[in-house]
């Protein structure tokens, strides 16, 4: 089983919505589309709400890992780990569609539950990530 983890983005709807509809940037929409077609399950890595199933409801927020101190990002990743355990998420492959700060400490946790962890857009700038996603959606 392949499970994708898609990071949250800054651009959000202006009211509570399901996780799959809360984030409205072009990058997120393409990453969601990719995950829906290439993974058996997918989840959102939310800076505010932790691990969200696409159907989980959440309110908009301004929090981002990009401005959080290192220790806060470690604590956030530990919370993601606990949520993965609680939900019983396991599989052959985890795919991280997320920036460095979102995958930094989550990557190691995922290795406990998956045989492999892939980061297909590793090292790509935002523009190249958009191109990568556009070519595959």
Image: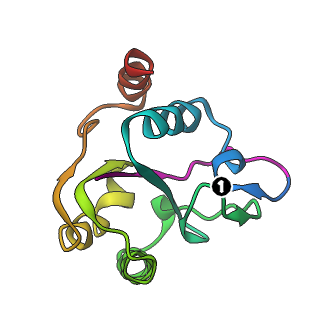
Left or right: 88, with 90 as reference point: right
- The residue closer to the viewer here, 97 or 94, is 94
Residue 11 lies in magenta, yes or no?
yes
Q: Is residue 66 above or below residue 132?
A: below
Residue bearing the label numbered 1: 19
Q: For the C terminus, which image quadrant? A: top left
Residue 4 lies in magenta, yes or no?
yes
**How many discs mark residues in the rendered view?**
1
- The residue closer to the viewer here, 114 or 102, is 114
Q: Residue at x 52, y 30 (%)?
A: 30
Left or right: 20, with 47 as reference point: right
Mark 1 residue crowding within 10 angstroms, few (<14) / some (14–19) / many (20+): many
Q: Which residue is drawn at 48% across and 63% down?
A: 65
Q: Which secondary structure lies at badge 1?
A: helix
| Outermost residue to the left | 115
Q: Where is residue 128 in the image (x, y as percent from the top left)?
A: 35, 23
Q: Quadrant of residue 71?
A: bottom left
Q: Is residue 72 above or below residue 32?
A: below
Q: Quadrant of residue 78?
A: bottom left
- Region of the chain picked out in magenta, as a range: 1-14
| Outermost residue to the top | 135
Q: Which residue is drawn at 29% across and 36% down?
A: 121
Q: Where is residue 62 in the image (x, y as percent from the top left)?
A: 68, 61
Q: Which residue is drawn at 25% across and 37% down?
A: 120
| Outermost residue to the right | 15
What colour scheme has been applied to the protein in the rendered image?
rainbow
Q: Where is residue 80 in the image (x, y as percent from the top left)?
A: 42, 75
Q: Position of residue 59 (x, y in %)?
A: 77, 64
Q: In this view, does 70 lie above or below 17?
A: below
Q: In this view, does 136 lie above or below 19?
A: above
């Amino acid at each position: 089983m392949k499970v994708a983890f898609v990071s949250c983005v800054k651009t959000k709807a202006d009211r509570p919505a399901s996780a799959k509809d809360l984030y409205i940037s072009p990058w997120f929409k393409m990453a969601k589309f990719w995950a829906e077609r290439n993974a058996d399950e997918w989840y959102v890595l939310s800076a505010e709400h932790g691990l969200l199933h696409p159907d989980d409801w959440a309110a908009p927020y301004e929090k981002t890992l990009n401005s959080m101190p290192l220790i806060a990002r470690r604590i956030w990743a530990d919370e993601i780990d606990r949520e993965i355990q609680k939900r019983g998420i396991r599989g052959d492959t985890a795919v991280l569609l997320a920036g460095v700060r979102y995958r930094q400490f989550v990557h190691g946790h995922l290795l406990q539950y998956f045989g492999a962890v892939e980061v297909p857009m590793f090292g790509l700038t935002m523009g190249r990530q958009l191109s990568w996603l556009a070519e595959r959606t």
